[in-house]
Image: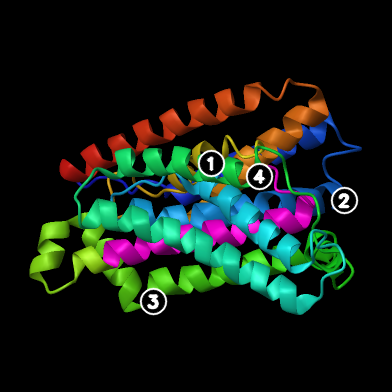
Amino acid sequence: MRRRPTASPTLWTGLVLIGLCALFSLLRPAAFPTLYNAQTLLVQAGPLLLLAVGMTFVIITSGIDLSVGSVLVFSGVVSAKTMEALGGGDATDLGWGAIGVGLLVALAGGALWGVLNGLLVAVARVPALIVTLGSFGAALGAAQLLTNGVDVRTVPSALRLTFGTGTSFAVVPNLVLVVAAVTLLAAWLLRTTRFGRHTYAIGSNAEAARRAGIRVTRHLVQVYALSGLLAGLAGFLSLAYFGTTTISGHSNDNLNAIAAVVLGGTSLFGGIGSVLGSVIGVFIPAVLDTGFVMVGVQPFWQPIAVGAVLVAAVWWDQRRRRARAGR
């Protein structure tokens, strides 16, 4: 008997997101469905979306990266410290040349952590869970050592006004435009290029990919480097938005990024996933966070809700895998 096709995980995630938006709009009609809240939600979700995009590539290869939140913090710190040094202790009045240097330092800092993760996973054959858990603590510790645990607050005004609070077309935040452009580029990279095809192949069967001529070790290093690079960009944009390094403000980013990717239909077992799904999935924790604040629910419930949804998504993924295997 032929099985009826099931709805895609991306569709279900989209319906859940629409339901949450409708619920909070009904509960707080004067606050949630407003232009200001939409702008704020998009801006706050921007750095998390970059983390989720990088995580999508990693998880499709059947890996994991628990370090992205700490790499974000580290990248923001080294960027802020660099611009502070260029400004002689106060980076407030720096021009775009020095800001560009700060951006390059943030990207390089994130990419270096990613390369380190990739080498340990692909070359040293240490499990990704252990490697990135170690990097999670090491990157955060390095950021705290560089600042003595005190946030850097001297961020260039031009950076804040352009990418922190600036808008284009009167309504679209510039930060959102940057994140959207990077996300579209990543979606194109995953779906239409050889790099994307190799990513899926490795996640489906790494040994078969190796026998087919794919350089699995090199590719895995590149994938983890990409994840680190996007975490570095997220750290720089977070610096622009908050005007400070927010060292202690990203403790849940790892969980939220993984939850968003899995909710979007990317399988933790590898070989399946899309950037579009992760885009939809990333707004579920963002909407929950904003909605809980508006309705007066303690913010401590947000990681509990995201954790529960993550477990449910993994359970659903296992059901799908067993159903496909039984066909």
* Mark 4 crowdedness (10 Å alpha carbons): few <14, some 14-19, many ≥20: some
Residue occupied by mark 3: 192
Vertical side of 15 occupied by 42: above or below: below
Residue occupied by mark 4: 147
In reply to whether residue 232 is colored magenta, the answer given is yes
In the rendered image, residue 8, in percent from the top left (x then y), is placed at 42, 50
Residue drawn at the location 30% of the way across and 45% of the way down: 128
Residue occupied by mark 2: 36
The magenta stretch is 219-246
Front disc: 3 or 4: 4
Quadrant where the C terminus sits is: top left
Q: Report the amino acid beneath label 3.
A: Thr
Q: CA distance from mark 3 to mark 4?
A: 42 Å
Q: Report the amino acid beneath label 1.
A: Leu
Nearer the observer, 71 or 271:
71
Mark 3 touches mark 4? (CB < 8 Å): no
- Does dot 3 land on a helix, a strand or a loop? helix
Q: CA distance from mark 3 to mark 1?
A: 35 Å
Front disc: 3 or 1: 1
